[in-house]
Image (tube, grey):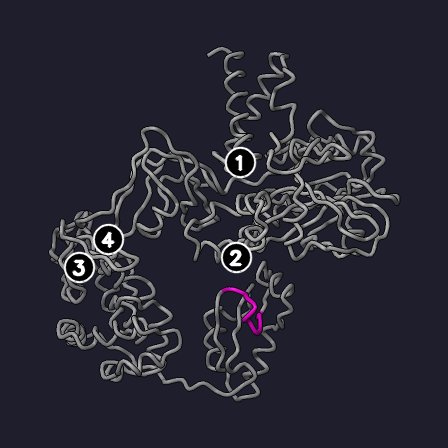
Amino acid sequence: MDKLSRMAELKELIKKYNYAYYTLDQPLISDKQYDDLYYELVALEKETGIVSPDSPTQQVGDVVLDKFTKVNHEKKLYSLNKANTREELKEWYDDMVALGAKKFSVEYKYDGLRVVAKYDRGLLKQCATRGNGLVGEDITAQVKTIKNVPKAISYRGKVTVMGEVLMRLSVLEEYNRTSLEPLKNARNAAAGALRNLDTKVTASRNLDAYMYDILSIDDEIVTQNDVNGFLKENGFDTYDFFHLVDSFEQIWSLIEDVDKVKSTLDILIDGMVIKVDDYGVRAKAGYTEKFPKWALAYKFEALEMTSLVKDIIWQVGRTGKLTPVCEIEPIELAGATVSRATLNNYDDIIRKDVAIGSTVFVRRSNEVIPEILGVAEHFDNSIRIEKPTVCPSCGSCLEYDDVNIYCVNDDCREKTIARLSHFVSKNAMNIENLSEKTIENMYDVLGIKSVDEFYTLSSADLKKLSAFKDKKTTKILENIEKSKSADLGNFIYALSISGVGQKTAKDIANKFGSLDAIKEASFEDFLDIKDVGEIIAQNLVDFFRNEKMLCLIDRLLSLGVNVESSAVLETIDSRFSGKTIVLTGTLENMSRDEATAYLERLGAKVTSSVSSKTDFVLAGENAGSKLDKAQKLGIDIISLNDLKEELKSVNIEI
């Protein structure tokens, strides 16, 4: 394809994606994929010298929806030019210094919907979207539902401020937990709510707004630092991230610091915005048709992209539960090549409208397993996914509850291998060097199908496996022998009791203290354990009344497994009794698990997320969004020293 034809193709594609993103709030591709197309067009326009007036490179935003009243902006709203590398950022920095810039502001680049808000004599008069940069949509009624947008300010002149409306990630998670139609991402959630004529819908999303600029004001503003000060003084939320620096090294250090912790924030950001502080230097730098030359957005590596669904693979877990795994066209995401992503269950497939042959949004945050957020676009050849009726591993008929699909055949190969792999895992019996591949080999070659058979293995058995020589064989036999001294909580977890995770297993061990006591426990005894509901309590009763399971436990004990009893820990009355506490940050000389155990001993309930029901947040070093949220909610913040003092006061040694 020649350059002019490619340019024409790119213009049509970008216009299509602009309309979907800005007008319909239904993005079809990720920001990264959009930027790749956009800058390919920019490069071709430079190369050919041909830039048509209708080129997307010359326009901001897209069509304004007719259903809203149009608002003419008093000043044009620009986009930001982007840098993806340190070198590009340094080149821009040097250009600005050459013009006389001495200081630069560094702020988050929010991934939400831009809004402008006009105030007159201290009262909020009008709010509008960016639209095409010249004309936006009147969303005053919608913005007034956002609690952190002040309806009145102390400044009595005329001022127009600009910022971004977002949906916090914790709010999005909570919304999607109960919604019949999950929202694809936080940006789409905020944009869709603001551009909904029903303000009840907007209010239901619990949005937040963060302001970062002044478009016009009756008084004089001469620096970005003045802007930030004005916004704070008048009660606007700025998310408390604003830095004024005077060197490139400081800018780059801030970018690196935020890049490390961005996934812990409760808001979605996709980069950093760097601006020349001095308005006089800004005037010298000027504007392009689309961008201010005095500001630049540094984009982080993409955490979200779109990809084509190739297939859905059903994996069988240790309890027999089937989990759908989405096979996608490989994409580079957050520093890794991603070819698979998770879905929760069949209902999740339906709710997210996933189909084979369609494109979907895929998100990966640091080391978190990639997940499917929702469908981006269906095509004529897209194939709906049918609910499975037989096990993909053993062919047995499947059973269903209200949420999940199960294979109930205990001899199912995949289910058995998953159960064996779980038994040897670190937080269970911790038999090192037994990978899932090795266990598959043991199943196929040695016929290992029950966890007790690990303790009957001999050197001659292991040498039948491929790549097993004397050194490896000896090491594995030593690790098996070492695992015979088992902590009670780990042993309970290793047994693969339905619904019993690592924490619940530990709680069971702490309550009953011995395996014999657990065997004799009643439904009511189990129900008395914190966070154990009726379903899990019944699962425990059924397991320890099952003759087959009791025989398995006896067999393990007869083969030398020694389950160490735990001291039954009684809770002690303290200032934390009955309180809900969240841990965040790094604790000096104490692990999170240790701190949790101490707090539970003091009668506290330790949870993972901050809410209005949280009583305390124990904050360590580098505390992130949980601390921010706690401070906004007025929750008491305590330190590790506070915990140590309380332990000392009730005579618990650390």
CA distance for labels 2 and 3: 36 Å
Q: Is residue 162 visible?
A: yes
Query: What residue does disc 1 label?
Result: 24
CA distance for labels 1 and 2: 24 Å
Residue shown at the point (29%, 79%) measured from the top left: 564
Quadrant for residue 611, please give it.
bottom right
In the visual, does 574 lie left or right of 528? right
Residue shown at the point (53%, 36%) measured from the top left: 24
Q: Considering depth in this image, is 285 or 204 the residue closer to the camera? A: 204
Query: What residue does disc 4 label?
Result: 316
Asked whether disc 4 touches disc 1, contact meaning CB atoms under 8 Å apart, the reply is no
Callout 1 environment at 10 Å: few (<14), some (14 to 19), or many (20+)?
some
The part of the chain drawn in magenta is 609-618
Query: What residue does disc 2 label?
Result: 170
CA distance for labels 2 and 4: 30 Å
Q: Residue 286 at what x, y percent from top left?
A: 78, 28
Query: What residue does disc 3 label?
Result: 408
Eye-nearest disc, 4 or 3? 3
Examine the rendered structure and indicate whether residue 72 appears above or below residue 584: above
Callout 2 environment at 10 Å: few (<14), some (14 to 19), or many (20+)?
some
- Amino acid type at circle 1 is Leu
Secondary structure state at the residue bearing disc 4: strand
Asked whether disc 3 touches disc 1, contact meaning CB atoms under 8 Å apart, the reply is no
User: Which numbered disc flags the more N-terminal residue, 2 or 3?
Assistant: 2
